[in-house]
Image (tube, helix red, strand yellow):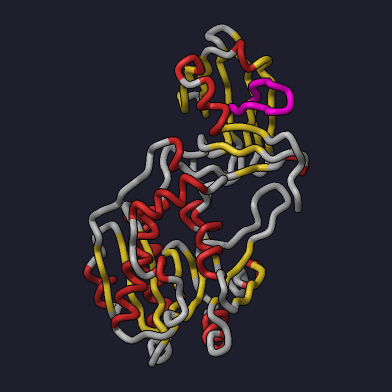
């Protein structure tokens, strides 16, 4: 039986639809070796459906807004002490993303497929040689995944592509249990879907981890939905556990152009960070945490966030902070 390429998507713009369309067109040229299934929380255009073997639309795109369920990624400037914060985004898409992946895996297994290559939709796949190589590796391995390594951020699983066998896949990736998944998110320190996925894929299984760089060959591109995005995740305050102070960090992580950030602290103290080029970061100390009342953040002259520390002083310290000790590598 052919391998199945499972594409998870949420294409709520014409540009994203075109990205999905291009990917399906590229994979369909290898139809003698791979079938295609697209699972989505948005309606899939008919011309894309015609190029697929299976398409499934799920209207339930549940987002998680509670502080204890939001992702808490970390950034480690100067490789000193990591900063963890839920304020890199307004919600967690973990449950929504896993819902369609689990649905796809379950249907694929019921249809008799043995090997699955899961892709997020926002890629250009000019060179599919990794799919063929991984298909062979799955004869002797349960899972193939990739790591993206950077000094200042987590180097766990690269979420855009994994290949795995369905007969040895963890049950939690075949049957959706909403409450159990939410409980696991609450217990996780970083609440990272990539970290939790890696644990489920590799637990008591034979796996092979490849460097993400092996995917970036011959015109392949991954994570297109992040390229040039106007939002800036790391533009936020945090509590420093070591100094008992409120600090502010700006990191122009994804952008292709400079960003301008200004903060207004306690309604009368204005700090202008100036222009911050792509891939650069700046930090600023606002003083003792107990003196903090309000903070307004302006990104490119528009209000991004307003914080009222008197409303959640202790809760904030648990959800946006810098560790006391250095990260263990």
Which residue range is magenta in the image?
236-247
Q: Is residue 128 left or right of residue 24?
A: right
Q: Position of residue 67 (x, y in %)?
A: 44, 35
Quadrant of the image containing the N terminus: bottom left
In the rendered image, residue 81 lying in the magenta stretch gets the answer no
Q: Is residue 291 above or below residue 163?
A: above
Question: What residue do we see at 56% from left, 7% from top?
Answer: 268
Secondary structure mostly taken by the magenta-highlighted segment of the chain: strand
Q: Is residue 55 left or right of residue 205?
A: left
Q: Is residue 31 visible?
A: yes
Q: Position of residue 18 (x, y in %)?
A: 36, 62
Question: What residue do we see at 53% from left, 27% from top?
Answer: 316
Q: Position of residue 225 (x, y in %)?
A: 46, 54
Question: What residue do we see at 49% from left, 68% from top?
Answer: 124
Closer to the camera, 223 or 3? 3
Q: Is residue 310 left or right of residue 240?
A: left
Q: Position of residue 178 (x, y in %)?
A: 33, 54
Q: Is residue 123 above or below residue 298?
A: below
Q: Is residue 29 visible?
A: no
Q: Is residue 43 above or below residue 262?
A: below
């Amino acid at each position: 039986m052919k391998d199945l390429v499972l594409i998870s998507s949420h294409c709520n713009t014409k540009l994203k639809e075109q990205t999905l369309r291009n990917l399906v067109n590229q994979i369909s040229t290898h139809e003698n070796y791979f079938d295609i299934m697209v699972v989505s929380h948005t309606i899939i255009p008919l011309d894309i459906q015609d190029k697929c073997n299976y398409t499934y639309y799920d209207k339930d795109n549940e987002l998680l807004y509670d502080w204890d369920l939001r992702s808490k990624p970390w950034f480690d400037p100067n490789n000193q002490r990591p900063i963890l914060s839920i304020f890199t985004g307004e919600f967690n898409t973990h449950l929504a993303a896993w819902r369609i992946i689990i649905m796809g895996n379950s249907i694929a297994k019921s249809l008799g497929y043995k090997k699955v290559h899961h892709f997020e939709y926002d890629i250009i796949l000019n060179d599919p040689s990794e799919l063929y190589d991984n298909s062979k590796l799955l004869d002797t391995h349960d899972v193939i995944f990739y790591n993206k390594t950077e000094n200042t951020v987590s180097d766990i699983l690269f979420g855009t592509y994994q290949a795995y066998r369905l007969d040895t896949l963890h049950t939690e990736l075949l049957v959706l249990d909403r409450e159990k998944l939410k409980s696991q998110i609450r217990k996780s320190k970083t609440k990272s879907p990539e970290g939790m996925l890696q644990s489920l894929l590799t637990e008591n299984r034979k796996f092979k981890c490849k460097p993400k760089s092996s995917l970036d060959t011959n015109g392949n591109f991954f994570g297109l939905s992040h390229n040039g995005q106007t939002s800036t995740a790391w533009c936020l305050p945090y509590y420093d556990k070591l100094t008992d102070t409120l600090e502010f960090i700006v990191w122009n992580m994804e952008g292709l152009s400079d960003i301008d950030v200004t903060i207004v602290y306690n309604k009368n103290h204005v700090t202008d960070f100036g222009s911050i080029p792509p891939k650069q970061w700046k930090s600023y100390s606002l003083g003792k945490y107990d003196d903090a009342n309000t903070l307004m953040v302006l990104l490119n002259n528009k209000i991004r966030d307003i914080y009222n520390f008197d409303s959640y002083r202790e809760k904030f310290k648990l959800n946006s902070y810098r560790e006391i000790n250095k990260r263990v590598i």
